[in-house]
Amino acid sequence: MYFQLNIFYICVMSGDITVAITGVGAYLPQDILSNADLEKLVETNDAWIVERVGIKERRILKDPEKASAYMGSEAVKELLKKTGTQPEDIELLICATVTGDYVVPDTANQICKLSGLTRAYGFDINAACSGFLFSLATGAQFIKSGTHRKVIVVGSDKMSTITDYTDRSTCILFGDAAGAVLLEPSLNEFGIEQIALYGDAAGKDLLRIKSGGSLRPPSAETVANKEHFVWQDGRVVFKAAVKGMSEAVKEVISRAGYQSADIDWIVPHQANYRIIKAVADMLDFPLEKVMINIQKYGNTTAATIPLCLWEYEPKLKEGDKLVLTAFGGGYTWGGILLTWAYDGNKRG
Ligand code: UT7
């Protein structure tokens, strides 16, 4: 313990704290919504969904009494257990979500309470499918500045509550899940190296939930018109996502002075297998080194990236170079390049 504190002191004094992800947790609801199930709801078929999107099934949190805060807190509990972290040592929790339990209050503080983080405060970030990246970048600043030593970043979305199960163009895409990572000052030289984040309101009408905000508050009319469900112009967003994600990945690699060949893993947001493949192709990057689990979970919005890290954790080695990338509503997009700080196979 003394040794760890001492290293932290030296880093703070030198003004050069590297921020590392030191653990990953996740929560997946038990209920599965398969392509065969969707065939009974809308005019679609397994072959179309697999070929055009790459999804076989998604998880759905059916319990109406539980939502994003519950899923996030379960992911946090697993994270604390796996890393041997005491709940009272966490100082800040940031939650990326577009499906907070309430408009007010935020979801992050509900997660703190449900998972017993007695000393932590929290706040939410809404950057849609890029929310985890934006939250990770934000959380890292609190550690880099020396303000906090243990920060949790959660991505949690109960997408089934904003999905129109009569619209075949969207209901095949989304699932429910949560993921969480612990951020701490690095005890080796490994951690976050480069951050590139972008936003462009040009995407406003191309991917959105039309009503429920202050511009179009809920009314009988907005409910009747199904304006509280997520909608997107899929083809336009598809092209923007490929461009945005591949450019962001290239940018962080080049800023760090690396080549593509130096990167061990790309961790992309899971919106469509064809988007992921197109990004890998544009970067001339082998698909075997791209984390992909969309076939099992679909698009879980803010949860996709931590869910990938969680699933691939046993394969990750100390020193591996990862580029996280996402694109989502706003538009928002970006890339984060980091060096993995621990051997994942040593975590239970
Ligand atoms: O996560 C945040 C960012 N979001 C994204 O990155 C998503 C980007 N977009 C996409 O992934 C894809 O555009 C979708 C998966 C949303 C749609 O795939 P697509 O290949 O772009 O299909 P499309 O919308 O161009 O539709 C092609 C055809 C249409 O029929 P026609 O007009 O050619 O006769 C659709 O009506 O496929 C039809 N179609 C379906 N057929 C069977 C649309 N949805 C379905 C369906 N089952 N579920």
Image (spheres, helix red, strand yellow):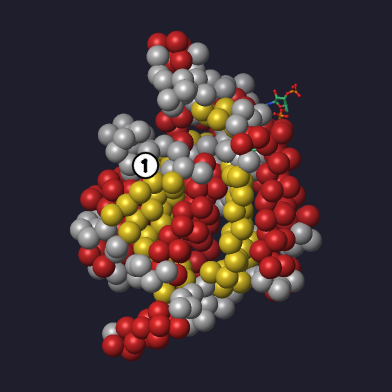
Q: Nearer the viewer, residue 97 or 91?
A: 91
Pick the quarter of the image with the N terminus: bottom left
Which residue sits at x=52%, y=41%?
128
Depicted 9 relative to depicted 175: above or below? below
Residue 341 visible at all: no
Q: Nearer the viewer, residue 143 or 262?
A: 143
Pick the quarter of the image with the C terminus: bottom left
User: Dot 1: within a 10 Å radius of its alpha carbon, few (fewer than 14), some, or many (20 or more) residues?
Assistant: many
- Where residue 335 sits, quadrant-wise, is bottom right
The spot of residue 138 in percent (x, y) is 46, 57
Which residue sits at x=72%, y=61%?
250
Depicted 208 relative to depicted 297: above or below? above
The spot of residue 46 in percent (x, y) is 63, 34
Which residue sits at x=26%, y=67%?
89
Image quadrant of ligand 1 equals: top right
Asked whether mark 1 lies closer than 8 Å to ligand 1, one says no
Describe residue 159's horizontal placement relative to residue 151 as left or right.
right
The spot of residue 180 in percent (x, y) is 41, 57
How many marks overall? 1
Describe residue 308's horizontal placement relative to residue 124 as left or right.
right
- Where residue 31 sits, quadrant-wise, is top left
- Where residue 252 sits, quadrant-wise, is bottom right
The spot of residue 32 in percent (x, y) is 45, 39
Which residue sits at x=52%, y=77%?
190
Residue 100 visible at all: yes
> For numbered disc 1, what is the local secondary structure?
helix
Per the image, the residue denoted by label 1 is 68
Depicted 269 relative to depicted 162: above or below? below
Which residue type does callout 1 highlight? Ser
